[in-house]
Image: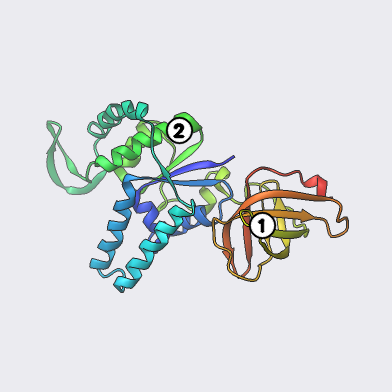
């Protein structure tokens, strides 16, 4: 089971460029065992444009840094680490409902001292309305929640959050959420891990190339942390994992998984289906 997360442009940029909320986005992409990261195809160009803007504002040191971020972003899409979500044509009917909310729910207050005319009255200065891209994001999120169930929209845009709330969409504001406050389904600590060391042989799922043998640091029904392997195994790589007991080699499990995080300390694997740990005892 995976939990779909739909990210707006600013949220996905936080993964590549250190900003408030970056730790939450990095956690979801690199360590959460169940998070399934999605962006809309129309946001791909907007993300790339944002990297150019960061360079113009000198928040990136060089054109090379900008180009490297863009290349990494596109590679993460190609490797399916970030999935492109295309909503179904029949759900475009939700657009009218979303736009009605967008243009009747006032944006959050921006400046309490400056007054402007709004909807026939006077209120404090407001932040910008959600734009067309934001509206498409909300339409897609309505579809995802309808089709899939538990799912989350990640955005820090105050007006988008207000509209999402009125549509009963579950949201996460990465700039105001701590890892401890993430929904339990997205927390890698959700399932108690057993500090059990079993032998782990890693094979590339496409080529059957032996990537090396190691042991688990801990393991649960949906994933495992392995001791580090020699060589850099990229995040998103699909591997066949052969697990067996050191004391009872005939007790073994084969499971398909993918790399969700990788560091000098170890390797995080998310299983594509749950396993029965009792068969290794």
Q: Residues within 10 Å of mark 1 (few under 14, many from 20)?
A: few
* Residue at position x 36%, y 47% in the image: 8
Q: Position of residue 212 (x, y in %)?
A: 70, 65
Q: Position of residue 178 (x, y in %)?
A: 48, 53
Q: Tell me: 240 left or right of 279.
A: left
Q: Which mark is residue 42?
A: none
> Where is mark 1, residue-wise?
208
Q: Is residue 54 above or below residue 1?
A: below
Q: Is residue 133 above or below residue 204?
A: above
* Residue at position x 22%, y 33% in the image: 103
* Of the pair 176 and 252, the residue shown nearer to us: 252
Q: How many marks?
A: 2
Q: Tell me: 182 left or right of 64.
A: right
The answer to which image quadrant residue 262 occupies is bottom right
> Where is mark 2, residue-wise?
145
* Quadrant (top left, top right, bottom left, bottom right) of the N terminus: top right
Q: Position of residue 136 (x, y in %)?
A: 31, 38
Q: Is residue 130 visible?
A: no
Q: Position of residue 237 (x, y in %)?
A: 57, 56
* Residue at position x 67%, y 53% in the image: 240
* Helix, strand or loop under label 2: helix
* Residue at position x 34%, y 51% in the image: 44
């Amino acid at each position: 089971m995976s939990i779909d997360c739909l990210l707006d442009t600013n949220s996905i940029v936080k993964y590549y460029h250190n900003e408030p909320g970056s730790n939450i986005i990095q956690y979801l992409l690199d360590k959460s065992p169940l998070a399934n990261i999605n962006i809309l195809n129309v946001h791909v160009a907007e993300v790339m444009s944002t990297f150019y803007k960061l360079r113009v504002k000198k928040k990136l040191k060089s054109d090379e840094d900008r180009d490297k971020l863009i290349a990494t972003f596109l590679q993460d899409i190609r490797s399916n680490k970030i999935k492109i979500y295309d909503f179904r044509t029949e759900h475009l009917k939700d657009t009218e409902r979303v736009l009605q909310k967008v243009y009747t729910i006032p944006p959050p207050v921006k400046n309490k001292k400056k007054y402007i005319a709004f909807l026939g009255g006077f209120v404090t200065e407001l932040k910008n309305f959600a734009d067309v891209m934001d509206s498409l994001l909300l339409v897609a999120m309505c579809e995802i929640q309808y089709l899939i169930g538990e799912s989350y929209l990640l955005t820090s845009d105050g007006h988008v959050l207000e509209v999402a709330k009125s549509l009963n969409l579950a949201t996460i504001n990465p700039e105001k959420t701590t890892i401890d406050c993430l929904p339990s389904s997205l927390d890698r600590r959700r399932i108690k891990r057993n500090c059990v060391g079993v032998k782990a042989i890693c094979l590339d799922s496409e080529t059957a190339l032996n990537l090396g043998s190691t042991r688990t640091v801990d393991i649960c029904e949906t994933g495992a942390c392995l001791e580090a392997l020699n060589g850099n195994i990229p995040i998103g790589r699909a591997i066949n994992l052969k697990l067996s007991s050191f004391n009872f080699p005939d007790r073994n499990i084969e499971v398909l998984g993918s790399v969700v995080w990788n560091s000098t300390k170890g390797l995080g694997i998310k299983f594509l289906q749950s396993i029965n740990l009792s068969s290794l005892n």
